[in-house]
């Protein structure tokens, strides 16, 4: 029965993508688009299988058991079940300040609640089978990633293959952003935000503006802190796109540095009512309490600019070079280190050929500054290699496309031309 349900839902959603022409504005056929969706489902199932087999305690099992416990009330107390499912969001009225380090715990818990509620909804249709649930989660994840790709493709269609690879096919992105984790929610929400922001800048329709704010709320409900990181570069992107200054990159860089400096000064400006640095420190302290197999030496942060400046090399090392490849490590850490070096190779190759001044796509400036800033935040706060690989995966799917859009790499251009030529030959035969 479970295999039957899995096949039926996979066929149903694949048919939905086919009927509603999901391949529109992608430059690829519907079969490739459906194929990447199926690949994400397979990766999500592999992620679930490994977690079930390797870990006695893991996030997926915790949320699944919590969802089944909530769902058990449906048959005995249906009115109570729907009341809690629809209206139980905690004491939101007393935690409206998303900039408060005190309220940060509430907003983190709210993201967990959203994740659990969606799993409850999935369990109703999947009869409680987590592998079938993977399909439901990946419909949302895939949709957001596809919108991110369509935005990049619409700006630079000649780089569609590179965008496709860096958004969908980087191993860590495929594995972690297809599993039943909140990483997929984050990437999907950001994909929706950038798509509707770009659409608002072009047509300024009321319906598009509504979708834009819904996307922001989507990210707020997923991981609120990433919304705080996103707002400054998003604001700069919108302002520069509206006023169109001559030197766009210089304007973006100067504006972002000013806002970044302002972040360090919020404690004094608001008389301790808003302390963004303390939120980061609370995040790090929370991770320090979790002990794991692959813990690495991470300096404790202090609430001042000097501490962040001092620990910058450590954060950069963690996010770009960890986990280090060692033959004695378990296979999962060896694979993670290989993926880390692959991503680092792409960052270096693309970074060496970046042409900031020649690029007129402010969108890629936004994507670069936002993703790299969160990269550093993760490097500062997460003291575990396994968690590092997972948490940075969705931002790898933002950083690499940003560098693709800002760079011109001759060897990649030749590779794309060769792939296109082979594709045309296959099509004609």
Image (cartoon, grey):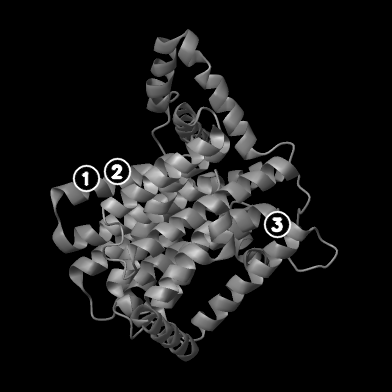
User: Can you tell which quarter of the image residue 340 is in?
Assistant: bottom right
Please state if 235 lies on the left or on the right of 340 as rendered: left
Q: Residue at x 46, y 39 (%)?
A: 100
Q: Are marks 3 and 2 in contact (CB under 8 Å)?
A: no
Q: In this orientation, does residue 274 appear? A: no
Please state if 215 lies on the left or on the right of 10 as rendered: left
> Looking at the picture, does residue 105 appear above or below residue 72?
below
Q: CA distance from mark 3 to mark 2?
A: 33 Å
Instruction: Check disc 1 and report its element: helix, strand or loop.
Output: helix
How far across and how far down the image is residue 409, in percent?
Answer: 46, 87
Numbered badge on residue 210: 1
Q: Residue at x 70, y 66 (%)?
A: 337
Q: Are marks 2 and 1 in contact (CB under 8 Å)?
A: yes
**Quadrant in which the C terminus appears:** bottom left
**Quadrant in which the N terminus appears:** top right
Please state if 232 lies on the left or on the right of 211 as rendered: right
Instruction: Check disc 2 and report its element: helix, strand or loop.
Output: helix
Residue nearest the viewer, comparing 58 with 201: 58
Instruction: Check disc 3 and report its element: helix, strand or loop.
Output: helix
> Looking at the picture, does residue 10 appear above or below residue 332?
above
Numbered badge on residue 214: 2
User: Can you tell which quarter of the image residue 23 is in?
Assistant: bottom left
> Looking at the picture, does residue 23 appear above or below residue 421?
above
Numbered badge on residue 385: 3
Task: Specify which label sits upstream in the sequence, 1 or 3.
Answer: 1
């Amino acid at each position: 029965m479970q295999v039957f349900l899995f096949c039926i839902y996979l066929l149903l959603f694949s048919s939905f993508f086919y009927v509603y022409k999901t391949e529109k504005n992608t430059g690829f056929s519907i079969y490739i688009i459906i194929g990447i969706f199926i690949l994400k489902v397979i990766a999500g199932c592999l992620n679930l299988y490994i977690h079930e087999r390797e870990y006695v305690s893991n996030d997926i099992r915790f949320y699944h058991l919590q969802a089944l416990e909530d769902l058990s009330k449906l048959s005995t107390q249906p009115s109570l079940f729907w009341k809690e499912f629809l209206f139980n969001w905690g004491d939101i009225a007393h935690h409206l300040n998303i900039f408060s380090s005190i309220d940060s715990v509430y907003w983190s818990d709210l993201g967990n609640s959203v994740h659990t509620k969606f799993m409850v909804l999935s369990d109703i249709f999947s009869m409680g089978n987590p592998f079938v649930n993977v399909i439901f989660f990946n419909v949302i994840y895939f949709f957001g990633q596809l919108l991110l790709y369509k935005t990049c493709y619409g700006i630079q269609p000649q780089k569609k293959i590179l965008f496709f690879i860096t958004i969908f096919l980087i191993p860590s992105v495929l594995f972690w952003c297809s599993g039943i984790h909140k990483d997929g929610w984050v990437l999907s929400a950001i994909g929706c935000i950038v798509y509707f922001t770009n659409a608002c800048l072009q047509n300024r329709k009321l319906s598009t503006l509504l979708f834009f704010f819904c996307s922001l709320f989507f990210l707020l409900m997923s991981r609120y802190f990433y919304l705080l990181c996103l707002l400054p570069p998003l604001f700069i992107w919108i302002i520069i796109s509206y006023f169109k200054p001559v030197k766009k990159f210089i304007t973006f860089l100067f504006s972002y540095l000013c806002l970044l400096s302002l972040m360090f000064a919020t404690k004094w400006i608001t008389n301790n009512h808003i302390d963004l640095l303390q939120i980061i420190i609370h995040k790090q302290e929370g991770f320090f309490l979790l002990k794991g197999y692959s813990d690495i030496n991470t300096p404790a942060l202090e609430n001042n600019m000097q501490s962040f400046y001092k620990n910058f090399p450590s954060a950069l090392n963690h996010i770009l070079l960890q986990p280090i490849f060692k033959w004695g490590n378990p296979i999962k850490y060896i694979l993670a280190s290989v993926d880390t070096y692959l991503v680092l190779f792409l960052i270096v190759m693309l970074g060496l050929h970046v042409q900031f001044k020649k690029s007129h796509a402010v969108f890629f400036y936004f994507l670069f500054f936002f993703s790299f800033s969160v990269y550093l935040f993760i490097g500062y706060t997460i003291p575990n290699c396994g968690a590092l690989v997972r948490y940075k995966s969705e931002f790898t799917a933002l950083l690499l496309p940003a560098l693709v859009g800002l760079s011109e790499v001759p060897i990649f251009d030749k590779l794309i031309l060769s792939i296109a030529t082979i594709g045309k030959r296959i099509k004609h035969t």
